[in-house]
Image: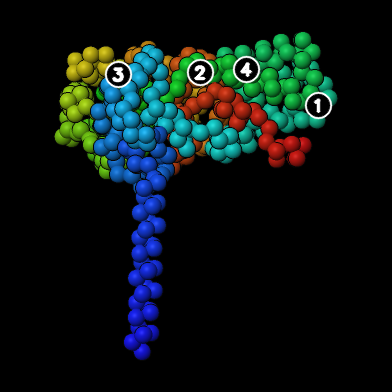
Amino acid sequence: MIHVILVIAIVVVSAVALFAARATLRMRRLPPAPEKPGLEAPDMAAAAKTSPPGPTPAARATPATPGAKHTDGRSGQAVETAPSPAAAPGAVTPVEQTASQSPAAKRDLMALRRGLSTTRGGFIAKLASVFQGKKQFDPAILERVEEIMLASDVGPTTTKAIVDRLRSELDRDALRDEAAVWSALRAEAVRILSVGGGPIRTATAPTVVLFVGVNGTGKTTTIGKLAMRYRAAGKRVLLAAGDTFRAAAVQQLEVWAARVGADVVKGKDGADPSAVAFDATTRAREQGADLLLIDTAGRLHTRSPLMDEIKKLRKTIAKALEGAPHETFLVLDATTGQNAIAQATMFREAIDVTGIVLTKLDGTAKGGIILAVCNELKVPVRYIGLGERADDLREFSPEDFAEALFGKTEEDVVAA
């Protein structure tokens, strides 16, 4: 019995020793673990679920000094850090590329088409009924196209531009089939929609963005969605509750702030919005925030005193930080049709509008209004809203939008 126990003990000890030796050998073969890199363009959805708000300590680590020597993690040899090339003016930083590559802005035409399904089922379906099955195209068809576009709130000026393009193609005998017509429509749409744009750049810290618009367009919700986007990309974001006359707006902004891990600057009920904006801009500068998003009360574009208040607010922000606000976004409700053009015209005359956010495109059959906005105002659409979810706020791409609106899907081809 003793002999059996001794044999078992020897076997166990030998197995443990062999395991330890192999583990040591593996450790010797492995190179030292490299230092953790800084924040690397996280996926928005993953970052929102798994990462705490804000950048990691590694993301704010001091970068290596150009020309300085450091030890390579793999070879153990001293190497010299190459100087980093200077960023070109207006260049998009890696974090901003993250924002532009988020689920809300990826070139997912199927998702974009789904968001525009109401428009495709109305405005675009009517155009399709005119073109379908035609062997030849004549000027009479252009009259029908003109009627449909005017009824869809594309607007007389923009409708004329599109019909003139089709007429020119028809005169050149270039509209030989239905595919050629849709191609011409897409090309003209891209031309009209390409008036600049792109996401918010945070080259200046803090970058101050002011949001204006009439009541109910979705300003506060838009701010919350943008805050989530840039927080997920590692930016330090501060929100300002400049709508001091509506307690619900302040509460809504606080909910978004808690959700994304951002602070809110607010005043008392009925406080001067300019004072709130001044305090927020000052705090953003002192705290080293990357982005300050300022909400404002909805105001009728026909009320001069309210428009003058926006002018005063902008001047106050400029006193707190020279050059601010760097962006002024006008938020428009797509379901209001041509009234959105009237609103935008009045706001643009009162203040310098640098971009438009067009919300609720998923709820209207007249999504062609976006063509009129760009063509008549010459102000770029920067973001479009296609639903209630945070990632339904998408960066606007003229090419993607034109393709999603006028392009044929596989289902369309099968149905034809």
- Marks 3/4: CA distance? 51 Å
Residue tagged by mark 1? 134
Viewer-proximal residue among 224 and 125:
224
User: In the rendered image, which quarter is residue 262 located in?
Assistant: top left
Residue tagged by mark 2? 374
Task: Quadrant for the N terminus, please.
Answer: bottom left
Give me the residue at 32% from left, 37% from top.
35
Give me the residue at 53% from left, 17% from top.
194
User: In the rendered image, which quarter is residue 175 located in?
Assistant: top right
For the residues labelled 1 and 4, say whether their Cβ atoms are less than 8 Å apart: no
Task: Quadrant for the C terminus, please.
Answer: top right
Give the secondary structure at mark 2.
helix
First in sequence: mark 1 vs mark 2: 1
Q: Amino acid at mark 4?
A: Glu
- Marks 1/3: CA distance? 69 Å
Q: Which mark is residue 188?
A: 4
- Image depth: mark 1 or mark 4 in front: 4
First in sequence: mark 3 vs mark 4: 3
For the residues labelled 1 and 2, say whether their Cβ atoms are less than 8 Å apart: no
Q: Label 3 crowding class (10 Å Cα cut-off): few <14, some 14-19, many 20+?
A: few
Q: Amino acid at mark 3?
A: Gly
Give the secondary structure at mark 3.
loop
Q: Position of residue 233 (x, y in %)?
A: 36, 34
- Marks 1/2: CA distance? 31 Å
First in sequence: mark 4 vs mark 2: 4
Viewer-proximal residue among 66 and 378:
66
Give the secondary structure at mark 4.
helix
Give me the residue at 23% from left, 35% from top.
264
Q: Label 2 crowding class (10 Å Cα cut-off): few <14, some 14-19, many 20+?
A: many
Q: Position of residue 85 (x, y in %)?
A: 37, 16
Q: Amino acid at mark 1?
A: Lys
Residue tagged by mark 3? 67
